[in-house]
Image (cartoon, rainbow, N blue to C red):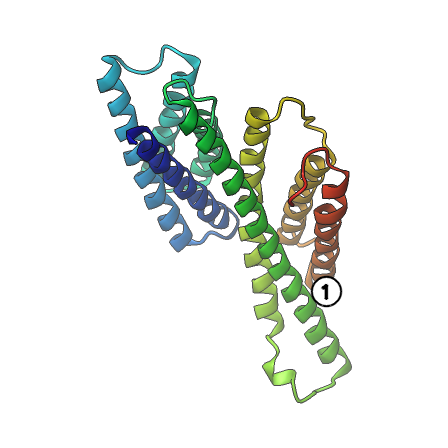
Amino acid sequence: MADMTIARLQEAMLVLYAVSLIFYFIDFLNKDRRSQTAAFWMTVTVFVLQTGFLLRAAYMTGQLPVLSLYDGVYFFAWILIVLSLGIQLKYRTSYAGFFLNVIAFSFMTIHIFAPVQAAGAGVATALVSELLFIHITFAILSYAAFAMAFVFAILYLLVYNLLKKKKWTAQFSRLPSLQHALTGMKSAIYTGIPVLLVSLILGVQWAYMALDDWNVFDVKIVGSFLLLVVYSVLLVLNRRGRLQAADFAWANVIAFVLIIINFFLGSKLSQFHFWL
């Protein structure tokens, strides 16, 4: 019972850490002070929880848990969080914190959902199942965010064409402005990219644990990483002024079509992705 409670607390800590990465990413791209503050305090909460787990392990074993690879991974993740918080407090920037936390999150995931050495088989099995659930949930949330970007792109193109042709319909006043539609597109992508990244990290870890025979070059895995690259490139080009206005909206439409293709065709061709 105690092991399952600890496992659930660690899962909650991991989800909180994942959400903090989303806020870090938003701040990283958009210099959003509120997102930076939220991400920082979420990371502080994760640090407190992780320190508690670390001290508990040290108390139970009588030594700092670093002698095995299993424990060393967790301690390494803890050090990265300490460095991240220290850098943010000293330099008032979350950029370095964002990248350090991506690495720390990856190692924390490896530790929490690794073949559990200290827990029973029942807890380990439950953790593998929970990992799959969290992976799928984050994947679906990322698709929802990109769907929102697609909707705002369509609205942008609609308003853009109406303004260009000077056609004022009865519904025109109910449509968002070009600026609001553009902001909606960007905000949705800001959210979708880190959520998809978290999903991919968790998905690879689950496949490593649960499947005896899987290929990192599976169609669905490759397609998902390509989507991550596509949306990241769209943001970079937009921020550099090389993809603006209607072109940016059309790029979002095309990117979402790729998501649909990856969702259905990728799943059909995949060796083990039968659910998404």
Residue 214 in view of the camera = yes
**219 sits to left or right of 27:** right
- 93 vs 234: above or below: above
> Which residue occupies 35% across, 49% down?
37
The quadrant where residue 63 appears: top left
Classify the position of the C terminus by image quarter.
top right
Q: Position of residue 195 (x, y in %)?
A: 53, 46
Q: Which residue is mark 1?
A: 246
Q: Work out whether residue 46 or residue 13 is closer to the camera in this orientation and state it.
A: 13
Please report the residue visible at 47 percent of the width from the left and 29 percent of the height from the top. 125
Q: Residues within 10 Å of mark 1 (few under 14, many from 20)?
A: some
* Residue 266 pos. (x, y %): 74, 42
Quadrant of the rendering where the N terminus is positioned = top left
Q: Residue at x 41, y 18 (%)?
A: 117
Left/right placement of residue 27 relative to residue 156 reads left
| Residue beneath the point at 72% across and 64% down | 246
The residue furthest top is: 67
The residue closer to the viewer here, 119 or 68, is: 119
- Element class at badge 1: helix
Q: Position of residue 65 (x, y in %)?
A: 32, 16
Up/down of 266 relative to 248, above or below: above
